[in-house]
Amino acid sequence: MTSSAFQLAGGKVAGDIFKDNAVLSNPVAGLVVGILVTVLVQSSSTSTSIVVSLVSSGLLDVGSAIPIIMGSNIGTSVTNTIVALMQAGEREEFKRAFAGATVHDCFNWLSVLVLLPLEAITGVMRLTSGAVVESFNLVSGENSPELLKVITEPLTKRIIQLDKTVIVGIATGQEVLRNRSLIKVWCQTRIMVQENFSILSSENSTVQNAEKCTHLFVETGLSDLSVGLILLASSLLVLCTCLLLLVKFLNSLLQGQVAKAIQKIINSDFPFPFGWLTGYLAILVGAGMTFVVQSSSVFTSAITPLIGIGVISIERAYPLTLGSNIGTTTTAILAALASPGDKLAAAFQVALCHFIFNVLGILLWYPVPLSRLPIRMARFLGERTAKYRWFAVLYLILCFLLLPSIVFALSMAGWKVVVGICVPCVAVLLCIVVVNRLQLQNPHLLPCWLQTWDHLPLWMHSLKPMDKIITRVTLCCRKTRNNDQSHTSLEDLPQLTECEAEKNLAPLSQNGPSFIYGYETETGAVFDSLNGKSSRL
């Protein structure tokens, strides 16, 4: 339902983004488009299906589609990062959960930084997938299995049904569909009718009968944006409630000896010398579980609370996440094999490029322990988030909205502008990372002025100034709200009579004169027991 809400709110915008094929010919722009569209519709399968339609219709070649597929791989990882925010109440849990969620982001970003330039120069994924497609005698098959949808579709179809062909039509330039609603009104049903009964033979014919849909928003008169916002608010409320209840339930269930036993089973390795096989088995488990639930976002979001409460370590979560990337591509491959004959080759090649991208990423960032940079990067992000909790929101806005939007705006000016600005920025960032590493491990290799950043202004090498500003603004807002709620005038304070004052004075005087001073009333006023008057502190 969350995916449907995002598609209603931003589906037509996503179609308009895909429509500009001149921009998509730029690999960097294609990457950013894939990120933004997948974040908008919250479904990598939807963005991939649009790409397949563009390729099969001849509006986009496979080489230009590959960066978009890479971007969709990054955009789909935003879901479990949002899920990690639900554990912000406890600092250590939030630290582990955010690190476990962002390990997926770090893997995708690092893979793109290496494989996107490699693909732009050599075309290795395009050539490999093309060779595989040509060697196969592809025949259109049946629809891919939808294991999880068998459970969820009966409920979601009662709430909302969407016509996703509108998004694809806008992306392929069909202006007639621009004013058409994404909310499905008429549902197609097939009815088998027998005709020409005779003793010798009987023939069957299929008749399509259009019936009005029965979901909640079929005839509400609301716009797509209004329905999308209603569904988004309600689905996020349900999601947050379920996640909070899940975390509470797991915390109460997985305690003591039970938690220790589960942690030992999940996080333990095979005995020597087969310990290195444990991670690859976790990759297979992640791929299999993702194939069952038909979504990498669902699987990674499900294990994020378990990482937060400490049941699954980040070292074990990393191969599970890599396996989920493989699992979601196998689902896309099966879906591509069910495509019609004229779209089969293009659909299969695009899905195969997605599979090859993830396999190459695993070969880059997993087999050698020293190459597992995503784990170290995720731990760094988790520590920063535990220290400054607002950093999580800043990370989401920066990595999934602001930065891609800036790069997309630059891409409108041409690839020379993108290269001229992005390459120096990336080079400076890499230099800063290398210097920081040397400052921690081998500072003697650096000149004196680079052994520390203390000579720079504090805001250039620390988040403390920004933290002070955010904390001050938060405290001011909280103080203003508290003042509005607790403001009471002197006339509203209780004025006690002399008789009431003597009653209050009597029990105090029994304990000696040292207890005869004043006591605070429920309204925040201080009652002077000697004078029988109340005043404000």
Image (cartoon, helix red, strand yellow):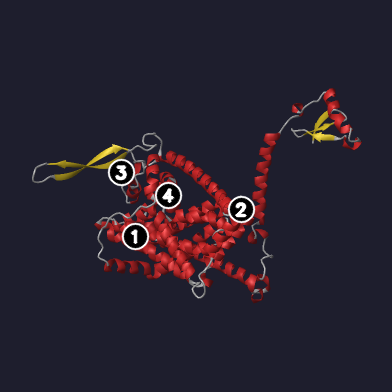
Three-letter code for the amino acid on which mark 1 is drawn: Ile
Residue 422 drawn at (x, y percent): 50, 63
Can residue 127 be seen here? The reply is yes
Q: Is residue 249 left or right of residue 496?
A: left
Choose mark 4 or mark 1, whichever is in front: 1
* C-alpha separation, residue under disc 1 versus residue under disc 2: 39 Å
Q: Secondary structure at mark 2?
A: loop
Q: Earlier in the sequence, mark 4 or mark 2?
A: 4
Q: Secondary structure at mark 3?
A: helix
* C-alpha separation, residue under disc 4 versus residue under disc 2: 27 Å
Say above or below: 374 vs 493.
below
Neighbourhood count class around disc 1 (C-alpha, 10 Å): few under 14, some 14–19, many 20 upward = many
Q: Are marks 4 and 2 in contact (CB under 8 Å)?
A: no
Neighbourhood count class around disc 2 (C-alpha, 10 Å): few under 14, some 14–19, many 20 upward = some
Tag on residue 333?
1
Q: Which residue is mark 3?
A: 176
Choose mark 1 or mark 3, whichever is in front: 1
Tag on residue 419?
none
Q: Are marks 1 and 2 in contact (CB under 8 Å)?
A: no
How many numbered circles does the render carry? Answer: 4
Say above or below: 466 vs 285.
above
Three-letter code for the amino acid on which mark 2 is drawn: Arg
Residue furthest to the left in view is 200
* C-alpha separation, residue under disc 3 versus residue under disc 2: 47 Å
Q: Are marks 1 and 3 in contact (CB under 8 Å)?
A: no
Tag on residue 41?
4
